[in-house]
Image (tube, grey):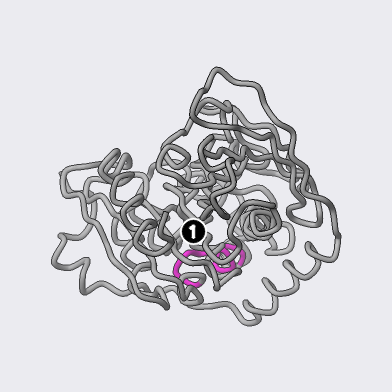
Amino acid sequence: METDLPEAELWAHRSSQTEPDGLDAFWAGTLARSRAAGGEVRLEPVGTVLRTVEVDDVTFPGYDGEPVRAWLRRPVTALRGDGPLPVVVEYVGYGGGRGRPEESLLWASAGYAHLHVDTRGQGAVWSRGDTPDSGPAGPQVPGVMTRGVTAPETYYYRRLFADAARAVDAARSLDGLDPARVAVVGRSQGGAAAIAAAALVPDVSAVVAMVPFLCDVPRALRITDADPFAEVVRYLATHRDEVDAVLATLAHVDGVNLARRGRAPALFSAALMDAVVPPSTVFGAYHAYGGPKRMSVWPYNGHEGGGVDDDRAAVDFVREHLGG
């Protein structure tokens, strides 16, 4: 059954989320500080059973220069000197990490360099991660949604979204990759990171945000009781005096506010039976998005969205805007 507004109302719906004062300065300062921290991008070849895809273990400087892990997958044929490859930077959903080098072969098999970015402090639920989180360890509900949530400066997603932007910087620094043809892609939390990367590095070439999480957070907290949004509800049920501070922090990472700053062509998707990411929150970010955009709607799907059909649409969209 539908979990939110009917589709006709979603096309008319606009988010009431408002921007906090100083949002642009907050993110500009975060990125300037992270870039000034320096650090090198390092690649180590990985031996795998794969015959058509080469894999490198990547470490790049993320938030505050802290090391973040990733896999770089490239089609073997592209290593023969046919010119620089267009790049897909992919971010991972909640609870997951970059996984194993033999996983997630779609983008390299489609002819792209694929930088598959690890998720700091996650990667122990459904996919392995290898990057620790350096953030403060104050009171929090299990998960990362409330880690440091009482101030934008300490919040977990400040660090994660800075990592997302710095991953684009890292991809652009690598030999054999085309810095002018970079797409940012993700599903759920990964879709939120893709929106953030497009806002913070607005000259990327394309954006794909499939059933993106962390959009129109105030509305999501009221209309879904599913995690991860429910982590915030449980936190506020005991920290009743922190509601204003928490909502102000969340506004700094809300996909609606960040989407307004995106300029690259974007493909969104929403699922009308999604109880984890209510479709009206996705439409809130979609309508706010500042560049050309398209939306795929899956009437009979939950948080899996369009599954392989979303993936195929993503490849077609990236190929349209990056070539390859």
Q: Which residue does the image show at 35% across and 50% down from the upper left?
A: 315
Quarter holding the C terminus? bottom left
Of 254 and 39, which appears nearest the observer? 39
Residue lying farthest to the front in this orientation: 81
The residue carrying mark 1 is: 183
Q: Where are the magenta residues, as a range?
A: 249-257
* Residue 11 in view in this figure: yes
Q: As displayed, is residue 3 above or below residue 51?
A: below
Q: Residue furthest bottom?
A: 21
Q: Nearer the viewer, residue 44 or 117?
A: 44
Residue 25: image location, x then y, percent:
69, 79
Can residue 155 be seen here? The reply is: no
At a point 63% along the width and 65% down the height, the residue shown is: 245
- The answer to if 96 sits in the magenta stretch is no
Is residue 93 rendered to the left or right of residue 163? left
Residue 44, given in percent of the width and then of the height, sits at 74, 33
Q: Quadrant of the N terminus?
A: top left
